[in-house]
Amino acid sequence: MFPVLKDNDVVFVNPNAYKASFPSVNDIVVAKHPYKDNTLLIKKIVSIDENEKFCLLGINKNSSTDSRSFGSVCKKHILGKVVGVSKYKLKEKKQSD
């Protein structure tokens, strides 16, 4: 199975998606890695346990670092909901002199 996201893909994230609602199973989210500072993950929520911890699984299960290796994560680790992906690289804004 090939990765869904490729280099240079642009991921659109709604950081306010879970301020008024709770994350749901099958949501694709951006989350902080629970043990590696400055590492962000894009994963699918596959289950929510009774303690409201989230089991995150990569789409490419054979080569993904996810809850199978680091366990379930708390809501505070979830930064937002993925709402879109663009396969086109955005042009960088040129700085004016």
Image: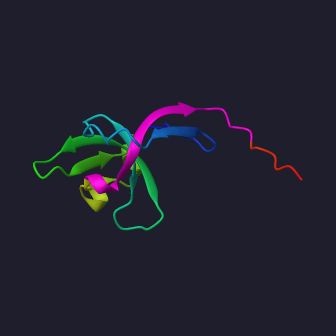
The image shows residue 62, relative to residue 89, as above or below, that is below
- How many discs appear? 0
Colouring rule applied to residues: rainbow
Q: Is residue 93 left or right of residue 36?
A: right
Q: Nearer the viewer, residue 3 or 81?
A: 81
Residue 88 placement (x, y as % from top left): 66, 32
Residue shown at the point (30%, 59%) measured from the top left: 69
Residue 73 placement (x, y as % from top left): 26, 56
Q: Quadrant of the N terminus?
A: top left
Asked if residue 90 lies in the magenta stretch, the reply is: yes
Residue that lies at the very extreme toward the right in this rendered image? 97
Residue 15 visible in rendering: yes
The image shows residue 41, relative to residue 25, as above or below, that is below
Residue 7 placement (x, y as % from top left): 61, 45
Residue stretch in magenta: 75-91
Residue 48 placement (x, y as % from top left): 18, 44
Q: Nearer the viewer, residue 60 or 30?
A: 30
Residue 3 visible in rendering: no
Residue shown at the point (24%, 55%) measured from the top left: 72
Q: Is residue 69 left or right of residue 64?
A: left
Q: Nearer the viewer, residue 69 or 8?
A: 8
Residue shown at the point (24%, 49%) measured from the top left: 54
Asked if residue 45 lies in the magenta stretch, the reply is: no
